[in-house]
Image (spheres, grey):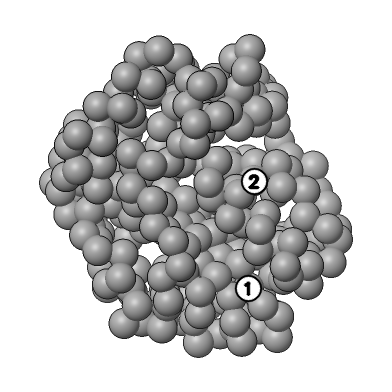
Amino acid sequence: MEKVHFTEEKATMLATLYGRALDSREADPVLGDHAADEAVRQIDYDFAKLGITRDSAASVVLRAKPIDGWAADYLRQHPDAVVLHLGCGMDTRFQRLAPPETVHWYDVDYPEVVELREKLYAAAPNHTNIGTSVTDFDWLDQVPSDRPALIVAEGLTMYLTPENGTELVRRLVAKFPSGELICDVFSRLGIKAQKLNTPVRRAKATLHWGIDDPRELERYGLDLMSSLDAAHWSTPDVMARLRPFTRFQLRTLKYFPPLARMAHIVRYRF
């Protein structure tokens, strides 16, 4: 068992890992992330204190599912791509998507996160961990710039300041000849309501960057392709797999657009 001691926002990554693990234990899981469940069983940590239940775990996998789908679509079209998984935490997206060896995948997060990842997840020839804050921009020098790029940032943007976030976008767009950015964003109301977010509150983390209209990022060289608010993350077949209370919550959300727009999953090209 690996002892884990993370502070502030670094601890929230354990909440999303646990959410995916709980989903994998369902009879008909949404994501089926069994690697996440294996990791949870190897980590010596009181996951119960994170406040993630079988019902609330749905928000974790409902966000990850369309991101996985868009990422897989890009890699089918660009089997020579480089992937930057920013603020990866303990996510097992590399294992879920199993990209071909012609794709080189970089998982980027703090050194202590990378240290735990390397203890729990098997190495692969087309995979590299980079231990750094994503806003210490020198790490970009380790990544080749002559290939199309898929950049995935799940559960990251809201922890950045607007200044750091926009500078990161500028640098990514300038580095690669072409690519896509797939991420999720919170609205400014979502930032104001952060104390209602149980994992964020219990981790004593702080959210900073709110984006009301995903087209705001187009001024930094991006072109918005798709945007899904929280009421539209699940398809009918996914909805059928959810627990009754979760289905009720999602149906109700459609009648309260400001709440649904507190979180978006977005896909940009550049």
Q: Quadrant of residue 211?
A: bottom left
Work out whether 47 lies above or below 92: above
State the residue at coordinates (26%, 68%).
162
Residue at point 86%, 61% (across, down)? 101
Q: Residue at 41% across / 70% down in the picture?
A: 224
Q: Position of residue 22 (x, y in %)?
A: 54, 19
Q: Residue 202: give x, y in percent of width and height.
A: 29, 28
In which quadrant is the N terminus drawn? Answer: top right
Q: Give the camera-side residue of 50 and 57.
A: 57
- In front of the other: 4 or 265: 265
* Numbered disc 2: secondary structure: helix
Q: Quadrant of residue 151?
A: bottom right
Question: Residue 32 appears at what percent x and percent y?
Answer: 65, 28
Q: Amino acid at mark 2?
A: Arg
* Residue topped by disc 2: 93
Residue at numbered disc 1 = 149
In front here: 202 or 62? Answer: 62
Vertical arrangement, residue 73 with respect to residue 79, above or below: above
Q: Is residue 46 left or right of residue 185?
A: right
Could you tell me if residue 104 is visible in this image? no
Q: Residues within 10 Å of mark 2 (few under 14, many from 20)?
A: many
Disc 1 residue type (three-letter):
Ala
How many residues crowd around disc 1 within 10 Å: few (fewer than 14), some, or many (20 or more)? many
| Of 239 and 69, the residue lying toward us | 239
